[in-house]
């Protein structure tokens, strides 16, 4: 795998840390409904580092941007799931705030990076 941008590896590490945080969330001993949400959230979160890794392998700018958009869509889905769990009060406000803040920062970074990429052509 070739890393084309330093931000790719940085974002990938961020996502791996985030996935670890999610996997440390409580198991079904708390509330069964939250556990069900947690089962849905984990695969979505685990897909984010995979999408970021796929982004690194593309040499064409359009492919690169397309896979960045897929990552952003997965991130949006994850944020929606977290907000749903927060709304139902299944997780502490502090925990969901930290997780949502983390995803919002990464979403902003991805969006800015995609816009910057669309304005220049690094690939032949």
Image (cartoon, grey):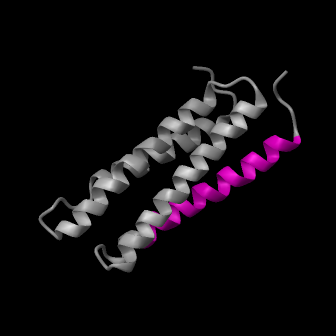
What residue appears at the point 83 percent right and 42 percent down from the top-left corner? 118
Q: Residue at x 48, y 65 (%)?
A: 80
Q: Is residue 124 left or right of residue 3?
A: right
Q: Position of residue 99 (x, y in %)?
A: 44, 64
Q: Which residues are magenta?
A: 97-119
Q: Is residue 26 above or below residue 16?
A: below
Residue 38 falls within the magenta-colored stretch: no
- Residue 81, by quadrant, is bottom left
- As displayed, is residue 31 above or below residue 11? below
* x and y, in percent, of residue 110 in the image: 66, 50
Residue beneath the point at 57% across and 20% down = 1
Residue 12, given in percent of the width and then of the height, sits at: 52, 40
- Residue 25 quadrant: bottom left
Please give left or right for residue 8 compared with residue 119 in the image. left
Using the rendered view, name the quadrant where residue 58 is placed: top right
Locate the C terminus and report the quarter of the image it occupies: top right
- Decide if residue 3 is in sight here: yes
The answer to which of 69 and 4 lies nearer the viewer is 69
Does the segment drawn in magenta span residue 117?
yes
Main SS of the magenta part reads helix
Residue that appears at 46% across and 58% down? 78
- Residue 21 visible within the image: no
Residue closer to the observer: 67 or 3: 67
How many numbered marks have been drawn onto this rendered protein structure?
0
From the viewer's perspective, tell me whether residue 100 is left or right of residue 6.
Answer: left
In the rendered view, does 71 fall on the left or right side of 109?
Answer: left
């Amino acid at each position: 795998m070739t890393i084309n941008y330093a931000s790719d590896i940085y974002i990938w590490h961020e996502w791996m840390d985030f996935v670890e945080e999610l996997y440390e969330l409580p198991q079904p001993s708390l509330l069964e409904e939250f556990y069900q949400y947690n089962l849905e959230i984990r695969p979505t979160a685990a897909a984010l580092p995979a999408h970021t890794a796929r982004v690194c392998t593309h040499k064409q700018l359009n492919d690169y941007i397309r896979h960045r958009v897929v990552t952003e869509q997965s991130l949006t889905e994850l944020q929606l799931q977290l907000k749903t769990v927060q709304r139902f009060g299944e997780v502490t406000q502090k925990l969901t705030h930290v997780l949502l803040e983390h995803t919002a920062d990464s979403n902003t970074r991805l969006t800015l990076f995609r816009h910057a990429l669309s304005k220049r052509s690094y690939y032949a």
